[in-house]
Image (cartoon, rainbow, N blue to C red):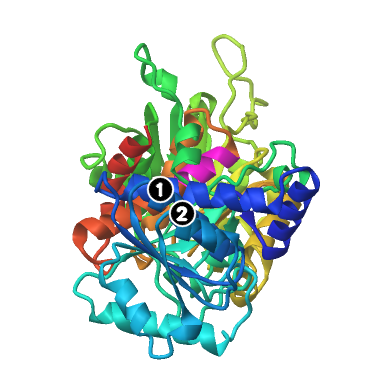
Amino acid sequence: MKLVTVAQMREIEKEADANGLAYAEMMENAGHGLAEIINEITFDDEGGDALGLVGPGNNGGDTLVALTHLAEDGWHVRAYVVKRKQDDFIARLIAAGGEVSFAESDNDFSALGMCFESADILLDGLLGTGIKLPLKDEISAVLEQSLFIMDELDEPPFIIAVDCPSGIDCDTGEAALECLPADLTVTMAAVKRGMLKLPAFEFVGDIALVDIGLPDDLASFHDLKTEVADHELVAGLLPERALDSHKGTFGTALIVAGSINYTGAAFLAGMAAYRSGAGFVTMAVPGPLHAVLAGQLPEATWILLPNDMGSIAGTASALTKSLESASALLVGPGFGLEAKTKEFLEGLLAGKSNAKKQTSQIGFVHKDAENQDASVTLPPMVVDADGLKLLAQIPDWHKKLPPLSVLTPHPGEMSVLTNLAKDEIQSDREAIASKYAKEWGHVVVLKGAFTVIAAPNGQLTVIPVASPALARAGTGDVLAGLIVGLRAQGLDAYDAAVAGAYIHAEAGLLAAEDLGTTASVLASDILNSIVDVISELE
């Protein structure tokens, strides 16, 4: 699903009209697609009762077209028309058997109340994507009265917003207090940016997309590089799992993680990598962590790293053989910020293992035989958590990472990497992520509400999830493990980041649904929900 500003959507429609797809035809396509979605989600094969709140703009037209199709399909439909003159769309609805009431002749809202009495579905088509707050009095009054009426009903209707909930600013995400909270927003052609901002997002509900017939070669639409992740997109990214596969088919994820204070981070990342579908997971942890973790993750192989008081220290020589066989490398979860761990990371990025090389002499070693640096080529890399903060202390760190590494900062870690204030980062997350992805030459996963994934080439994907279920220690370790596991299976850096972030977010929502609250969701609950999310994607 493409993500657009209001101005971009207007330009798309303008170009489509100039290329032969008239505005009226786009409206017909939108209304027909909306009716199809309504028929798909209803449980009564013979239709039901639908009420449309119809405004003066194109969204009102979309709603009238949809109601007409529903009437022709056997539905009982009503339109409550606000500030819209009698037109062909209204005439067609009446001809199809629909009922129409006009707000101008309903001063006490009695007609509106009668319209709601038997409505199974409410189509909110009062306002479109171009409105600015505050709302005009007449529109505001209809929305407020609708809220009051539904509050008094034993079973309020299922609310479908047409293109966007009436009363949200589709650029800024501002929302009028009288907005109707939609169960589903059926948006036309593309998702509008303001819908994925708070507080507007609270009124959007689930999102579905309707094709309005745009030509495939429409430049203003085709050239858009910003998308919203959805089920269909992510399902298409996951690797196929052929019947003749073996464990080597799905790669080896090497995870360098943990310290004595953050033991769980290594476990969460390792288990998430396995749950993503990776064939092998090798855990490289400080020696003291092995006894604690090995019994919890018996499927993994282990490398015990030198340590100083439980934090990784020394050289990366223990990783030499594993780096050669690894399909992808994750560094950082649970590292801590000790200076010796930073030295370890710096040596790893320098591509040196400091492993001893023996001469070919027989019987003895020459006195001048010395430790020589063995060159190491790093596999595709993911850097997370404290690994990012340690990176920031290494000069030209972005030049020392393998090409197109994946960086997974939350706003605080992004602040350390960029020297920008967190408020500045949060004020325009998409622009900041895109800027630094291009500047650094790596994929940036800027975590938080509506996680942003940005690539150096300008591609950008937003995850349409904002939930306190994900605001818990350890959830980032799960995300990093998912991404490295998918990377190990052969997904490119950007696709692995998009798929991992989407699966992670959906697992958080599912965990909260299973528990009945977002307050009690733990990182391990999200980890356990990954299986159900992936099973739905396959």
Give the residues in magenta.
494-500
* Mark 1 nearby-residue class (10 Å; few <14, some 14–19, many ≥20): some
Q: Which one is nearer the viewer's eye here, 513 or 9?
A: 9
Q: Is residue 239 left or right of residue 227?
A: left
Residue at image mark 2: 68
> Does the magenta-highlighted stretch encompass residue 336?
no
Mark 1 vs 2: CB contact within 8 A = yes
Q: Quadrant of residue 381?
A: top right
Q: Secondary structure at mark 1?
A: helix
Q: Is residue 159 left or right of residue 511?
A: right
Q: What x and y, as percent, mark residue 124?
A: 45, 67
Amino acid type, label 1: Glu
Residue at image mark 1: 72
Q: What x and y, as percent, mark residue 377?
A: 63, 30
Q: Which one is nearer the viewer's eye here, 47 or 309?
A: 47
In the picture, the disc for residue 166 is: none
User: What residue sits 41% from the left and 19% below the top?
Assistant: 248
Amino acid type, label 2: Thr
User: What residue sits 38% from the left and 90% below the top?
Assistant: 108
> Does the magenta-highlighted stretch encompass residue 498?
yes
Q: Secondary structure at mark 2?
A: helix
